[in-house]
Amino acid sequence: MTGFELTEEYQDLSDTVRDFADNVVAPVSAKHDEEHSFPYGVVKQMAEMGLFGLPFPEEFGGMGGDYFALALALEQLGRVDQSVAITLEAGVSLGAMPVYRFGTDAQKQEWLPMLASGEALAGFGLTEPEAGSDAGGTKTHAHRDGGNWVINGNKEFITNSGTDITKLVTVTAVTGESERADGSVRKDISTLLVPTSTPGFRAEKAYNKVGWNASDTHPLTLKDVRVPEANLLGEEGRGYANFLSILDEGRIAIAALATGAAQGCVDLSVKYARERSAFGHTIGKYQAISFKIARMEARAHTARLAYYDAAARMLAGKPFKTQAAIAKMVAGEAAMDNARDATQVFGGYGFINEFTVARHYRDSKILEVGEGTTEVQLMLIARELGL
């Protein structure tokens, strides 16, 4: 990326994924959404394209790209099917990235090749029934016993945790306590690698969601789950801090996905406004419609600039936490606002599930909630302002 202009390599990637999204993903999206079925065929083709390995080095089976390449792919997928886009986002930035960022050489060699190839998926086990945005309220516990960690607890809303190709979930758990300088007690939260075949690990019945119906999401139960001590991911007691850094990166990815959703609503609305006639003119000739779509385009453009900026800072090794929060908030709101306006442009057809704008309307709300609510992003931005 040079400034805000894509290099030829980035543009080629974006165009390739756009073609794939339009010609492979879009034709089957309505079917999977209606059936609440996981798109294994689409995921397999994404794996064959190397999308799950975009930001990882070739030595681990990756494509040798970077996080911005992943974001560009997510934007193009998000235009036509948010469920497919979040499957890639969660599989890479939440599933495989913790292993790449914090894993030992042995852990990377064991897990990254299968995750980067898309042969297997991994989940990100952070959220709990009583600890959503307040991840520090983690109640899942783990203790050492005979060279193993024994884990007990529950997780909620875990993406990619129950598919036929899910092989791993990284889990946060309280592994001890330490005293702060002021004398108060702090939970020490660590991260553990839990293969899904481990006895006591269970993905419960999938949620019946409002949207993202083709995305795999389950609550998890861990009952006396035993994994080797070597499955500790990163430094003991640093699990919470490490996961927060993963979420900072993930917000750029979610912002890219949301930007794609916002742009998809623009594209669909422009096409419909050019074709639909009322009172002797195509509806795009009326300012009530054309101005609405113009505002939609402005939102999508602003969201794109925001995530490009956050990604550029990240790749340059500069602080990007605040910019990622801004991008996630702006893009999530753009997706939801554009979905609402697109539904209005389409009128009654916008309320019919077989139309993509209706799916965007149901799907986009979670973009203001998942990976940190809008309120959490505002809190992070306000802190940066010294408030």
Image (tube, rainbow, N blue to C red):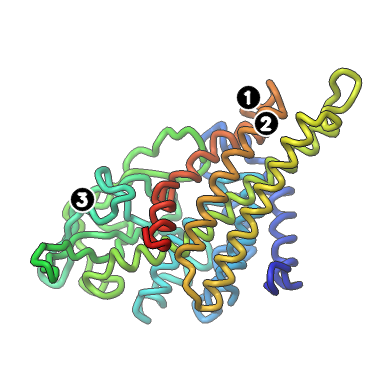
Which numbered dot is residue 215? none
Which numbered dot is residue 153? 3
* The residue positioned farthest toward the left in the image shown: 183
Task: Look at label 2 and name its amino acid.
Answer: Phe
Q: Quadrant of the C terminus?
A: bottom left
Q: Quadrant of the N terminus?
A: bottom right
Q: Position of residue 126 (x, y in %)?
A: 32, 55
Q: Position of residue 141 (x, y in %)?
A: 17, 57
Q: Real-space Cα distance between discs 1 and 2?
A: 8 Å
Residue 119 appears in the rendering: no
Answer with mark 3 or mark 1, whichever residue precedes in sequence.
3
Q: Residue at x 38, y 53 (%)?
A: 379
| 329 with respect to 140 (left or right) | right
In the rendered image, which residue does mark 2 sit on?
Answer: 355
Q: Position of residue 163 (x, y in %)?
A: 44, 49
Q: Nearer the viewer, mark 3 or mark 1?
A: 1
Q: Position of residue 20 (x, y in %)?
A: 71, 54
Q: Residue at x 56, y 31 (%)?
A: 34
- Is there CB contact under 8 Å for labels 1 and 2? no
In the rendered image, which residue does mark 1 sit on?
Answer: 351
